[in-house]
C-alpha cells in the first residue's frame, strides 16, 4: 500500500526518525504512483550489458544496467548502485534444461517491519532486508569541505534464475541463458526483457530496422510498377486498387516507424502500436486473416509478441503483391556511373541478381558489349575499380529474364555473379555501382534481385 499523505510539519513538534522516513516514503510513492497512472507497466530496462566471457565459465555478471523495478525502485549499475554479485549458474542447469531466465531481485518494502539491515548482518546479505546500511563520507555541499560519515541504504540486489524465484521478492527479468551447440553457456540473442525504451535492446532495434528495410524495398517496387503501368495501362487495371491501398498502408507506417527507430527512447508499446496498425491494415488484403488474430502486447514477453508481428507483416506483404523480386533503383551520379542502395538485406542471402540494359544500339552489339564493358561493384569502390582496370562482378546474358522480373520492352537481361571482392564489398557497404563506358552512354539500367524462395 502506497503512502500518499504528507507529513504535517509544525512549530514545536518533537522530531524523530519516523517523520523523515514517512516524508521520504511519501516522495517515493508519489513518483511511483504518478508513473503507474501515466504509463502502462512503467518498469523495465533502459540499458544493459552482460559479461559474455564470464558466462562461458558459468557465471552471470552484469557490466552495466539501468532501469526501474516493478515496484518503482530505480537502479543504475555501476554509476549509482553497486553491481549485484555475480551468480554461478552451472549447477542450476540440469542436463535436459535448454535455458533459464536471469532475474534481478530484491526484497519488497514491508510496512511496519525492518527494511534496512544494520551492523554485522549487513555484511552477510542483510538477512532479507531491502537495504543494507553503509557508511559513506559526505562533504558539505556549500563549502565542499567538512566531510561527515553518513549512513546510506544500499539496495540489496541479487541475481537469481527463474527456478530460484520466490513470491516474496520483487523481480525483473534481465536475460535468458541457454547452451550453444558446443554446450557452452551464452546469452540468447533473441530474448527481449521488459523495456522502458526500445533503444535498450539491440534485438528489438534490429527487428525494427528489418521491417523498415522491407517496407522501403516494397515501396520502391510498387513505385516502379506504377511507372511501368503508366506505359501499359491495360496490364495494370487488375492490380491498381490493391497496389495503391498497399502503398498507402506502407507509407502511413514508414515515417512513424523511422521516428521510433531514430529517437530510440519510445516505449515498446508505442513501437508495438505502429507495427500492429500496419499488421492490421495488411489483413485487409488477406481472405483468411483478421486483426483479432494479431498477438496482444505482452510487456514481459516482448520477444514473442514482436516476433509474431514481424512474421505477420512479412507474410502479408508477400500475399498482396509478391516481392519475390526486389528492384534496386539506380540513379546516374556521374556521366558513366549509376549507383543504388540495397535496403533489403534478403538480397544478400540466397538470391539471383539480374541486370537489365535498354540501349538504342543493335541488340547483338549490346549483348556482346555489356559483359565486357560494363562493370558492377560496390558503389564506394566502382571508381577505383575502373581506374585500376580490374574486372567487376561477372555478367552473363540471359536469353529470357526470370519470370519474377518485371519486363521492360527493348531491354536485355544479364545475370550478375555473386562471388569475389566486389561482392564482399557490396555486402559490407550495402550499395551497388554500375559503370557503363562511352559506347553505352545512352543505355538505361535496372537492377533486380530474385529471392531464392520464388525464382522463376
Image (cartoon, rainbow, N blue to C red):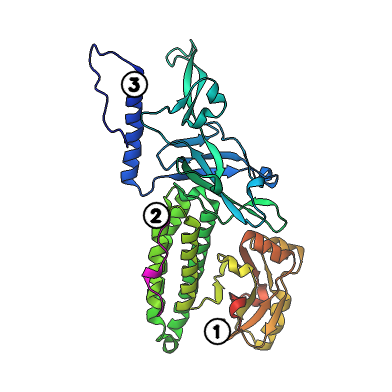
Whole-percent x, y for residue 33 in the image: 32, 39
Q: Is mark 1 on a helix, strand or loop?
A: loop
Q: Is residue 65 above or below residue 438?
A: above
Label the magenta part by its dominant secondary structure.
Answer: loop
Whole-percent x, y for residue 357 in the image: 61, 79
The residue that label 2 is drawn on is: 270
The residue lying at 61 percent from left, 79 percent from top is 356
Assign the N terminus to one quadrant of the image. top left
Q: Give the range drawn in magenta.
A: 287-298
Q: Quadrant of residue 276?
A: bottom left
- Estimate the spatial distance between the alpha carbons at disc 2 and disc 1, rounded to whole Å: 41 Å
Is-magenta flag for residue 239? no
The residue that label 3 is drawn on is: 18
Is-magenta flag for residue 291? yes
Q: Is mark 2 on a helix, strand or loop?
A: helix
Whole-percent x, y for residue 389 in the image: 76, 66
Amino acid at each position: 500500500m502506497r503512502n500518499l499523505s504528507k507529513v504535517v510539519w509544525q512549530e514545536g513538534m518533537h522530531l524523530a526518525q519516523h517523520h523523515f522516513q514517512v516524508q521520504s516514503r511519501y516522495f517515493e510513492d508519489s513518483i511511483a504512483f504518478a508513473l503507474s497512472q501515466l504509463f502502462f507497466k512503467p518498469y523495465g530496462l533502459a540499458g544493459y550489458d552482460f559479461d559474455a566471457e564470464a558466462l562461458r565459465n558459468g557465471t552471470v555478471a552484469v557490466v552495466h544496467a539501468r532501469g526501474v523495478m516493478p515496484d518503482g525502485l530505480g537502479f543504475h549499475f555501476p554509476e549509482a548502485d553497486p553491481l549485484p554479485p555475480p551468480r554461478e549458474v552451472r549447477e542450476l542447469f540440469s542436463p535436459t534444461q535448454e535455458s533459464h531466465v536471469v532475474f534481478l531481485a530484491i526484497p519488497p518494502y514491508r510496512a511496519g517491519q525492518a527494511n534496512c539491515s544494520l551492523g554485522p548482518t549487513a555484511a552477510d546479505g542483510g538477512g532479507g532486508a531491502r537495504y543494507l546500511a553503509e557508511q559513506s563520507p559526505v562533504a558539505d555541499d556549500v563549502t565542499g569541505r567538512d566531510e561527515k560519515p553518513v549512513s546510506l541504504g544500499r539496495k540489496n540486489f541479487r541475481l537469481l534464475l527463474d527456478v530460484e524465484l520466490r513470491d516474496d521478492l520483487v523481480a525483473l527479468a534481465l536475460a535468458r541463458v541457454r547452451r550453444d551447440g558446443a554446450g557452452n553457456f551464452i546469452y540468447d540473442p533473441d530474448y527481449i526483457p521488459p523495456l522502458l525504451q526500445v533503444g535498450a535492446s539491440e534485438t528489438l532495434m534490429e527487428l525494427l530496422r528489418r521491417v523498415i528495410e522491407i517496407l522501403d524495398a516494397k515501396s520502391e517496387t510498387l513505385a516502379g510498377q506504377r511507372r511501368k503501368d503508366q506505359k501499359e495501362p491495360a496490364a495494370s487495371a487488375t492490380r491498381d486498387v490493391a497496389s495503391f491501398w498497399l502503398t498507402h498502408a506502407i507509407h502511413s507506417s514508414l515515417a512513424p516507424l523511422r521516428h521510433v527507430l531514430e529517437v530510440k527512447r519510445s516505449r515498446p508499446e508505442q513501437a508495438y502500436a505502429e507495427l500492429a496498425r500496419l499488421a492490421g491494415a495488411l489483413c485487409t488484403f488477406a481472405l483468411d486473416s483478421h486483426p483479432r488474430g494479431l498477438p496482444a502486447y505482452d510487456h514481459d514477453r516482448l520477444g514473442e509478441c514482436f516476433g509474431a508481428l514481424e512474421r505477420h507483416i512479412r507474410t502479408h506483404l508477400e500475399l498482396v503483391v509478391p516481392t519475390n523480386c526486389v528492384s534496386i533503383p539506380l540513379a546516374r551520379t556521374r556521366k558513366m556511373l549509376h549507383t543504388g542502395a540495397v535496403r533489403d538485406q534478403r538480397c544478400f542471402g540466397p538470391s539471383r541478381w539480374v541486370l537489365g540494359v535498354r540501349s538504342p544500339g543493335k541488340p547483338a552489339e549490346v549483348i556482346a558489349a555489356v559483359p565486357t564493358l560494363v562493370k558492377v561493384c560496390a558503389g564506394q569502390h566502382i571508381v577505383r575499380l575502373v581506374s585500376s582496370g580490374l574486372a567487376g562482378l561477372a555478367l552473363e546474358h540471359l536469353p529470357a529474364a526470370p519470370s519474377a522480373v518485371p519486363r521492360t520492352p527493348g531491354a536485355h537481361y544479364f545475370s550478375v555473379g555473386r562471388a569475389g571482392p566486389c561482392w564482399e564489398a557490396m555486402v559490407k557497404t550495402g550499395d551497388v555501382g554500375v559503370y557503363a563506358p562511352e559506347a553505352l552512354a545512352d543505355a538505361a539500367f535496372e537492377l533486380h534481385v530474385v529471392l531464392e524462395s520464388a525464382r522463376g
